[in-house]
Image (cartoon, rainbow, N blue to C red):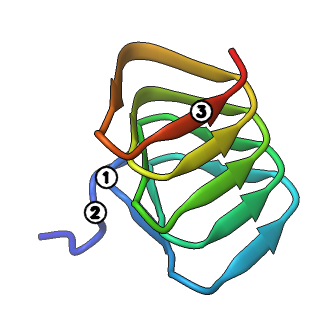
Amino acid sequence: MSLKPESGSELNLIGSGTVVEGKLRSPGSIRIDGKVIGEVMATQNVSIGSSGEIEGNISAKNVTISGKVKGSIVAQEKLAFEAKAVVRGD
């Protein structure tokens, strides 16, 4: 029996008040409640919480936005905007 998670099932969290500058890449999913200045790429899901903010491009299988995004968004399957989402870009 292996305790290693299945490939692509990892979840990365960027907490409220945290600021990350640079490229962010994940083989799983990313939840952002803080601020990212740079590119965000995930093979699975990217979720931006209501306090989350991204200044850069986003690329993932599924993208859900509740916060602010300034940049291009590429979703391979599904792109969802919550009521308070603010997006400036493509």
Q: Which residue is drawn at 83% across and 50% down?
A: 38
Q: Are marks 1 and 3 in contact (CB under 8 Å)?
A: no
From the image, state whether disc 1 or disc 2 is nearer to you: 1
Q: How crowded is mark 2: few (under 14 residues within 10 Å), some or many (20 or more)?
A: few
Q: Earlier in the sequence, mark 1 or mark 3?
A: 1
**In the drawing, what numbered circle is on residue 87?**
3
Asked if residue 56 lies left or right of residue 12, the reply is: right
Q: Which residue sits at x=48%, y=69%?
A: 33
Residue 46 at x, y = what percent?
45, 44
Q: Kindly identify which residue carries mark 2.
A: 5
Q: Nearer the viewer, residue 44 or 68?
A: 68
As measured in the structure, the alpha-carbon distance from the residue carrying label 3 to the one carrying label 2 is 33 Å
Q: Residue 83 carries which label?
A: none
Left or right of 10: which side holds 5? left
The residue at 45%/13% (across/down) is 76
Q: Quadrant of residue 22?
A: bottom right
Q: How far apart are marks 1 and 2 (CA)?
A: 6 Å
Whole-angstrom CA distance, mark 1 to mark 3, is: 27 Å
Q: Name the residue under label 1.
A: 9
Q: Name the residue rendered at 39%, 48% in the picture.
A: 66
For label 1, the crowd category at 10 Å Cα-Cα, with few meaning under 14, some 14 to 19 and many 20 or more, is few
Q: Which residue lies furthest to the right in this view?
A: 22
Contact? badges 1 and 2 (CB < 8 Å): yes
* 72 versus 65 height, above or below: above
Q: In which quarter of the image is the N terminus?
A: bottom left
Task: Check disc 1 and give the amino acid type.
Answer: Ser
Q: Which of 23 and 26 is in front in this view?
A: 23
Say if mark 3 contacts mark 2, CB within 8 Å: no
Q: Reading the chain from its start, which is encountered first: label 3 or label 2?
A: 2
Camera-side residue of 82 and 72? 82
Tag 2: residue type?
Answer: Pro
